[in-house]
Amino acid sequence: MINLLRQVFGALYQRTKVKSASTCEGVCATLPRRSVPTLNRLASFFFPDFWDISEPEKFAEIVKDFTKQLPHGYHASDNFITWGRNNSMFDDLAFIKAWEDNIESLADRGIIWRRYVLATSAFHCIQLEGDFVECGAYTGVGVKTVVDYLGGVNFPKQFWAYDVFEHQQGMTNKPMPEVSSELFDRVNRKFADYQQVRVVKGHIPDSFKNNCPDQIAYLHIDLNEASSEVATLKYLFDRVVQGGMVILDDYEWSGIYRPQKLAEDEWFDSRHYRVMPLPTGQGLIIKR
Ligand SMILES: C[S@@+](CC[C@H](N)C(=O)[O-])C[C@H]1O[C@@H](n2cnc3c(N)ncnc32)[C@H](O)[C@@H]1O
């Protein structure tokens, strides 16, 4: 009898699992089609976005000269100089369109590789249960690049975009140039046609209270402040679904960002995770 029950319930469980996997059918329709690269064509990228050095303009000239010595397939921007790469983001035409359509600042152009890490993570996460979350949405460009890559106004998930939008007393991070009393309205206007994007104004973690999803597939944390980032992890990490991804924008940067890594390593260590440091300066965790 027990074996019979096991067989019946086991079969039901299997069917449920197959059914949830097939939810991809709807979502997969919004996935961008792969653009097929040409074997002998490699893109290179130079953009003078270098920081944490005393003379950035002079440094950019030196780097530009240096790239003349390099074979194709170099990337020189966002403090990340390398060569002999596929530069895959340039082969993904849907991404290039989303990225170009959303460039508002020099930094938005310079951090293309970081944006592609977000876009490809989102490509994975959109096929899971759970919502999308960005903590530290700022001008909304990171959110909108991902949303436009994965369907634009037909993006098939709810995307929660949190930010305080105005620098407040007591915040220890350096204020971003465009935070102001108008930024929240500006970001809301940007998403006026995107019903799926919910812009939440307020200080994290207080702004999560009664106002955040139960299940999260994609969690991008970019607050430039160790205490707020760890508070975010405490509040949201348990809501990240199995296979969901957490991207820590500044994990692998040193200098003023190093306290973030130190605090996050301690937090993740107690949960038996080790953050994958990416050469872009980001850190990546895949939820078990
Ligand atoms: C580096 S910017 C985010 C950039 C954005 N993710 C992008 O890709 O363009 C950091 C943002 O975090 C916000 N921020 C920092 N601490 C915060 C907190 N405790 N609560 C809410 N927002 C916060 C700032 O207002 C700022 O807009």
Image (cartoon, rainbow, N blue to C red):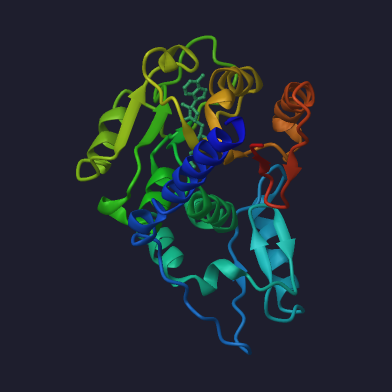
Q: Residue furthest front?
A: 1
Q: Is residue 9 at least partly visible in the picture?
A: yes
Q: Nearer the viewer, residue 16 or 53?
A: 16
Above or below 82: residue 6:
above
Whether residue 222 is visible, yes or no, is no
Question: Which residue is depicted at the point 33% across and 30% down?
Answer: 199
Residue 192 falls in image quadrant? top left
**Residue 250 falls in image quadrant:** top right
Q: In the displayed structure, does residue 223 sit left or right of residue 215? A: right
Residue 248 located left or right of residue 116 = right
Quarter occupied by the C terminus = top right
Q: Is residue 75 left or right of residue 135?
A: right
Spot occupied by residue 47 in the image (x, y as percentages of width and height): 58, 62
User: How many numbered marks, from 0 up?
Assistant: 0
Residue at image coords 46%, 30%: 215
* Residue 254 position within the rendered picture, expressed as x and y whole percent measured from the top left: 76, 36
Q: Position of residue 57 (x, y in %)?
A: 64, 55
Q: Quadrant of the N terminus?
A: top right
Which residue lies most toward the bottom here? 40
Query: Foreground: 105 or 61?
Result: 105
Camera-side residue of 164 and 212: 212
x, y percent for residue 274: 78, 36
Q: Residue at x 55, y 18 (%)?
A: 235
